[in-house]
C-alpha cells in the first residue's frame, strides 16, 4: 500500500503544480515547474508514475 499521495494545487502565480506527499506530511517530490492547466499538471503526474517506477539510482562517487 502506498504511503504517499499526489496533490494538485494552484500556486500564488496561478500556475497548476503537483507534489508527492508522504503520509507523515513530508514532501517527497514536486513538479519543479508550474503548468498552465490542471490537465497538464495531471499529465506530469502520470509521466512520473509511468517513467520513474523502476528508475535506476546513479551514485556519483
Image: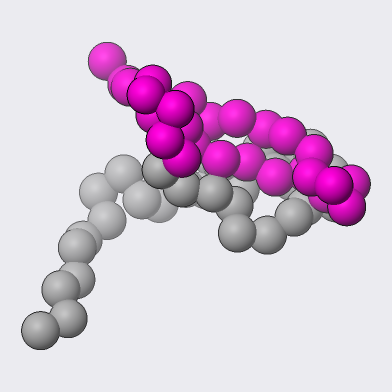
Quarter where residue 16 is shown: top right
Residue 49 in view, yes or no: no
Task: Locate residue 50, reporting x and y percent.
Answer: 43, 44
Task: Locate residue 60, reporting x and y percent.
Answer: 17, 81
The residue sitting at the bottom extreme is: 61
Q: Nearer the viewer, residue 37 or 23?
A: 23
Task: Locate residue 6, reporting x and y percent.
Answer: 53, 30
> Is 37 contained in the magenta span?
no
Task: Locate residue 19, reporting x and y percent.
Answer: 56, 40
**Residue sitting at x 77%, y 52%:** 35
Q: Quadrant of the N terminus?
A: top left
Q: Quadrant of the C terminus?
A: bottom left
Residue 26 in view, yes or no: yes
Q: Which portion, as a residue range, is magenta?
A: 1-27
Image check: 49 left or right of 39?
left
Q: Above or below — where is 6 with respect to 37?
A: above
Q: Nearer the viewer, residue 21 or 40?
A: 21
Quarter where residue 58 is shown: bottom left
Image check: 60 left or right of 4?
left
**Residue sitting at x 46%, y 40%:** 27
The residue sitting at the top extreme is: 1
Amino acid at each position: 500500500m502506498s504511503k504517499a499521495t499526489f496533490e494538485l494545487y494552484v500556486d500564488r502565480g496561478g500556475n497548476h503544480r503537483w507534489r508527492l506527499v508522504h503520509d507523515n506530511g513530508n514532501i517527497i517530490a514536486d513538479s519543479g515547474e508550474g503548468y498552465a492547466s490542471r490537465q497538464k499538471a495531471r499529465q506530469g503526474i502520470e509521466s512520473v508514475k509511468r517513467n520513474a517506477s523502476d528508475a535506476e539510482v546513479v551514485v556519483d562517487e
